[in-house]
Image: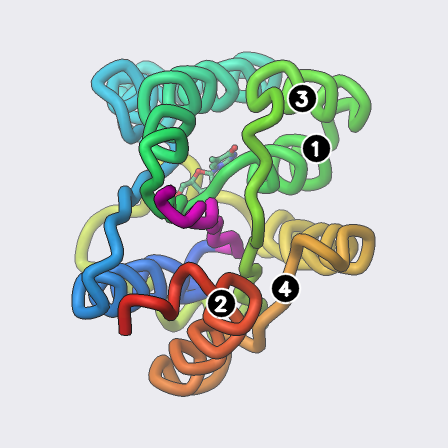
C-alpha cells in the first residue's frame, strides 16, 4: 500500500516568507521523488482564480463588505478542497497549501472582527474532515514584513490595510498556535531562509516518516 503523505499548510502575514518556504519545500520533495500538489488561496482552481481576481484586483471591489469577503474566501476554499485537495490526498500525494482555513480565522475573524463563531462554522462546513496534518505559521514583526513587501507592483486591495490590521493578524496567529499546539508550529520567520527551510524539513521528516523514506 502507498504510504499516506501529509497535508501541510503554510500561514502568516504578508511578507512573512511563506511562499519562499513553499517553493523550497516543493523543490526538496522533487529531489526526493515524493509526489505532491501545491495550492494557493484564494485561488488554485479556475473558479477560485476568478474569485481571487474579485477579491484582490477587480476595479469595482473597493466597496466589498467584510461579510462578502468572508463568503468569497470560503467559496474559493470549498472548490479547492473538493476539486484538488481531497482527491490528491486520496491518490496518496502530499499536499502543500499556501494558506488555508487559519487565514480566514485570523483575517476575517480577528482582523476584520467578524463573529468568531460564524467564521468557525463556515470554516467547518467548507473543509469538513479535510484538516491539515501540520501547519507552519511564519511569525515576523511588522517592520520585517513591510520591508519584504516592497514590491515593484501596486499593493492589491488586501495589502492596503492600516498597520494595526497587521498587528491583529500577527497576534491572532500567535493565539491560534497557542490553542492548537498539536497541529500548528510557530516558526521564527525573521531568520535566514536556509535555516527556516532546514528547521521545517527536520520537523516534517521526524513527524512523517513517509516523507523521508524516498531519500
Ligand atoms: P497572499 O497571496 O500574499 O497569500 O495573499 C492573500 C491575501 O488574502 C492576504 O492578504 C490574506 C488574504 N486572505 C484572507 O484575508 N482570508 C483568507 O481566508 C485567505 C485564504 C487569504
Say which of marks 2 and 4 sits in front.
2
Span shown in magenta:
1-13
In the rendered image, which quarter is residue 103 located in? top right
* Rendered residue at 32%/46% (across/down): 155
CA–CA distance between discs 1 and 3?
A: 14 Å
What residue did someone put label 1 on? 109
Tell me the crowding category of disc 1: few under 14, some 14 to 19, or many 20 or more residues within 10 angstroms, Cα based: many
CA–CA distance between discs 4 and 3?
A: 21 Å
What residue did someone put label 2 on? 204
What residue did someone put label 3 on? 124
Tell me the crowding category of disc 2: few under 14, some 14 to 19, or many 20 or more residues within 10 angstroms, Cα based: some
Residue 45 seen by the camera? yes
Task: Reply yes or no: does residue 170 show up in magenta.
Answer: no
Q: Position of residue 33 (x, y in %)?
A: 19, 61
Say which of marks 1 and 2 sits in front.
2
* Rendered residue at 56%/23% (across/down): 127
Amino acid at each position: 500500500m502507498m504510504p499516506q503523505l501529509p497535508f501541510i499548510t503554510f500561514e502568516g502575514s504578508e511578507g512573512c516568507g511563506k511562499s519562499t518556504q513553499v517553493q523550497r519545500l516543493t523543490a526538496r520533495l522533487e529531489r526526493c521523488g515524493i509526489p505532491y500538489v501545491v495550492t494557493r488561496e484564494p485561488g488554485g482552481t479556475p473558479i477560485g482564480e476568478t474569485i481571487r481576481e474579485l477579491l484582490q484586483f477587480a476595479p469595482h471591489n473597493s466597496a466589498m463588505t467584510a461579510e462578502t469577503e468572508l463568503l468569497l474566501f470560503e467559496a474559493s476554499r470549498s472548490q479547492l478542497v473538493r476539486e484538488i485537495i481531497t482527491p490528491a490526498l486520496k491518490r496518496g500525494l502530499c499536499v502543500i497549501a499556501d494558506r488555508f482555513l487559519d487565514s480566514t480565522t485570523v483575517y476575517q475573524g480577528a482582523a476584520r472582527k467578524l463573529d468568531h463563531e460564524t467564521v468557525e462554522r463556515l470554516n467547518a462546513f467548507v473543509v469538513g474532515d479535510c484538516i491539515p496534518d501540520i501547519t507552519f505559521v511564519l511569525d515576523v514583526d511588522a517592520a520585517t514584513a513591510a520591508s519584504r513587501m516592497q514590491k515593484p507592483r501596486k499593493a492589491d486591495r488586501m495589502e492596503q490595510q492600516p498597520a494595526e490590521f497587521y498587528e491583529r493578524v500577527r497576534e491572532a496567529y500567535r493565539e491560534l498556535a497557542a490553542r492548537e499546539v498539536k497541529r500548528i508550529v510557530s516558526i521564527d520567520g525573521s531568520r535566514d531562509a536556509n535555516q527556516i527551510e532546514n528547521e521545517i524539513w527536520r520537523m516534517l521528516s521526524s513527524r512523517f516518516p513517509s516523507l523521508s523514506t524516498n531519500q
